[in-house]
Image (cartoon, rainbow, N blue to C red):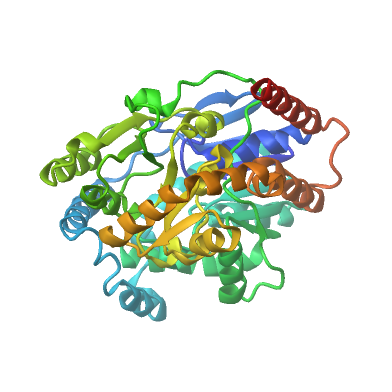
Amino acid sequence: MSPEVVMVSANAVVHDARVVKYATTVAGLGHRVTAVGLSPTGARTETTLGAVPVVQAALQRPTAVARIWTRLTVRLGRELRTRRRRDGGHALLRGSGRRIEVYRRHPWLVPGRLVLRDVRRQERAIAVELRRLRPGVVHVHDIYLLGAAVRFARASARDGRPVRVVYDAHEYVLGLANVAPRRVAALRLLEERFISAVDRVVTVSDPLADLLQRDHGLAERPLVVLNAPVESASGAAVRPLREVAGVAAGTPLLVYAGGLVVERGVQTVVDALPELPGVQLVVVVNRPGSMTRWLQARATALGVGDQLHFAPFVPPDQVAAYISSATLGLSPLLRAPNHDVAVTNKFCEYLAAGLPIVTSDTPAQAALVRELDLGTVHQAGDAADCARAVRAALADHDRLAARMRADSELRHRFSWAAQVEVIRGLYESVAGATPVRDILASRQDKVRATARDEHDRREN
């Protein structure tokens, strides 16, 4: 039996938290869902996410020319990252906007078959699976496979079989902070070419929804589904982050939980540590690498090596419980157009964990922190101002934490349960009324019951 919905993503799927949440949620609403991504080994494989089948499509081996191009771009990317580390990321987008605009005005300078040759390979691989699965809805995550989804829908329409396409814009393409300008321009041209052909657009924040509607002249404002954490119904115990990092109770503990590249600004917090004696910082990372070594060397050179710790990832539905023993949650993003409209995973996870937030002055998150009284704001990339913001949040910690714990509406707004209602409405519009086999409501009832039991246990 063909699936009603295929979730498409230009990665292996299983490690993409947003795609996993969507796939399991839409399946929980009663639709037949298959997730399709790309094989990390190149060979086609099949696996599952709970009850959701996952296909990792086979990727053709790149040509010799493509392999040479890839090696060159990887080398250039490595050199660019090294330069950004040397200047702390402050020259992040210097000149990029002008170059992107030149490329957009002269598309012949960014031929997709060259600049996006990896995307072309991915499109061919995904097209094979879409033709095999013949879904009624293709939900394409991020920009890379938007063209493949729309082309499949058009071919199906010619055969008399309508297919609906949902485009889930994870980022503001023009504002990508760590992508070469020529590639940014090519991706933006791809988005401009196909976005008007989709049935619904979804994105990750209200400011980005407004930008997409303005830039592309969309008749309908994109829906917003936040990158909120899923509540765990299992009640599985997780070792507290404070214990993992070896930080004593009562010691101020700052946590950064997220991707680790220069553009995320963690070096700003490390540089602030000399002005924060007695304060410990733990960075939650997928695995050690060049960034962790660079940050540790930076901390050691500043004489604060013993204030910096690293801790491993945990499954997405355990993050809030894992980090809840910290004192403050940090989001020190550097300023870039994409960052300016982002409401990040970590922001929602800190709220779920009950942690007051110290954020850089990226407008979307800074506005929420100020409007909702969630913590403090500092100038992006400014270590002295970051230290000031941390001290202010620590001084006001008890009031902030109590205010957040008491605001159930706030916690619900930034929870995945709230996003489920948006997704339910979306799928009623593109796939018909929610099937009678909707199992998600009972699962959420179980989550709420578990939370009530835990609250009662703590009160007693």
**Would residue 76 appear left or right of 376 to someone viewing this image?**
left
Quick one: quadrant of the C terminus?
top right
Which x, y percent locates residue 287?
31, 31
Asked which quadrant contains residue 109, the reply is bottom left
- Viewer can see residue 131: no
Quick one: quadrant of the N terminus?
top right
Q: Does 272 appear above or below 60?
A: below
Asked which quadrant contains residue 310, the reply is top left
- Viewer can see residue 395: yes
Which x, y percent locates residue 49?
59, 26
Q: Residue at x 58, y 40 (%)?
A: 352
Q: Does 387 appear above or below 23?
A: below
**Would residue 135 appear left or right of 140 to someone viewing this image?**
right
Which x, y percent locates residue 180?
30, 62
Which residue is nearer to you in this view: 362 or 27? 362
Q: Does 246 appear above or below 115?
A: above
Which residue is nearer to you in this view: 231 or 179? 231
How many badges with numbers are in the image? 0
Q: Residue at x 66, y 43 (%)?
A: 406
**Would residue 27 appear left or right of 386 to someone viewing this image?**
right
Which x, y percent locates residue 285?
35, 35
Which residue is nearer to you in this view: 348 or 281? 281
Which residue is nearer to you in this view: 20 or 92? 92
